Image (spheres, rainbow, N blue to C red):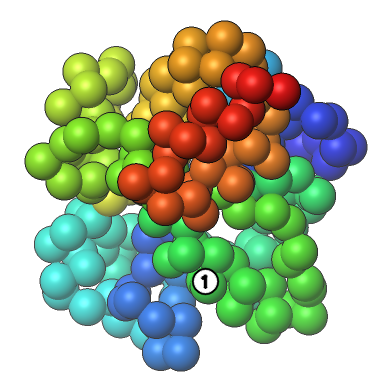
Amino acid sequence: MATTKNSNEFVILDFETTGLSPEYARVIEVGAVIVRDAKVIDTVSQLMYPGHSIPYFITDMTGITNQMVRGKPTPEKFMPTLHKFIGNRPILAHNASFDKKFLLSEMSNIGKKIENSFLCTLKLARRLILAPNYKLTTLTSHLKLKVSNSHQAHRALSDVMATLQVWLYIKKQVSERMEKEPDFNFFMKLEKHPKNKITKLFEQVASY
């Protein structure tokens, strides 16, 4: 698992958890890939035992059962591996604020800090794509993106690979609009930009 920073590399990350807040919930699955030049070069996927029973509604949504996580490493045991995998690369996620708060919490539990940049495909999609809603499954269906036949919504690695497809679609649209390939920093600026001022932002960039 490489950790050396490369300007063309970033990590796509997704967690499945026992609830919505790390104040009371824990991570039960992580999926992550390292992407370089639009290609996946490394992958990690791990179920984890959260230290308490998985609520029924979480099992109903994810398919992850108490039996599946029994005997798996706790988040405290696995987070050092994930920390090394991520390195200092930027992190991309769909609804990144959710994954970020769990990542920060779980890393804090083992005395590790995360200061990586985060980019959110949900925020980008809201600014650039007209869709019925911006759930990952809706976007992949609406945009007719290619996902694996074995794709399982709300399973970490499957959602990571779906997020990659959304990202590649967004990147292609923006690159064509700008007539050049923007860097990660531009997308971070774009996700924070007011939707009604996006066109003006592209015009400003084009004039440089």
Q: Quadrant of the C terminus?
A: top right
Relative to 65, 142 lies left or right: left
Instruction: Relative to 6, say whether 44 is above or below.
Output: below
SS category of the residue bearing label 1? helix
Where, quadrant-wise, is the N terminus in this rendering? top right
Q: Is residue 151 above or below residue 82?
A: above
Residue at image mark 1: 102
**Along the line of sight, which residue is nearer the eye, 190 or 60?**
190
Question: Label 1: few (<14), some or many (≥20) within 10 Å?
Answer: many
Residue displayed at 22% across by 68% down: 58
Above or below 143: residue 82: below
The x, y position of residue 32, in whole percent, is: 55, 43
Instruction: Say whether residue 159 is visible.
Output: no
Q: What residue appears at the point 55 percent right and 17 percent down from the top-left corner?
A: 178
* Residue in view at x 42 percent, y 26 percent: 170
Tag count: 1
From the viewer's perspective, is 128 left or right of 13?
left
From the viewer's side, name the closer residue of 170 and 43. Answer: 170
Specify the farthest residue to the bottom.
23
Q: Residue 104: image x %, image y %? A: 63, 72
In this rendering, would 174 be left or right of 117?
A: left
Kindly identify the residue that appears in the image at 22 percent across and 78 percent down.
Answer: 55
What amino acid is found at the position of numbered circle 1 in the picture?
Answer: Phe
The residue lying toward the viewer, choosing from 76 and 198, is 198
Q: Position of residue 52 (x, y in %)?
A: 37, 84
Q: Quadrant of residue 53?
A: bottom left
x, y percent for residue 120 = 48, 49
Residue 9 can be seen in this image: yes
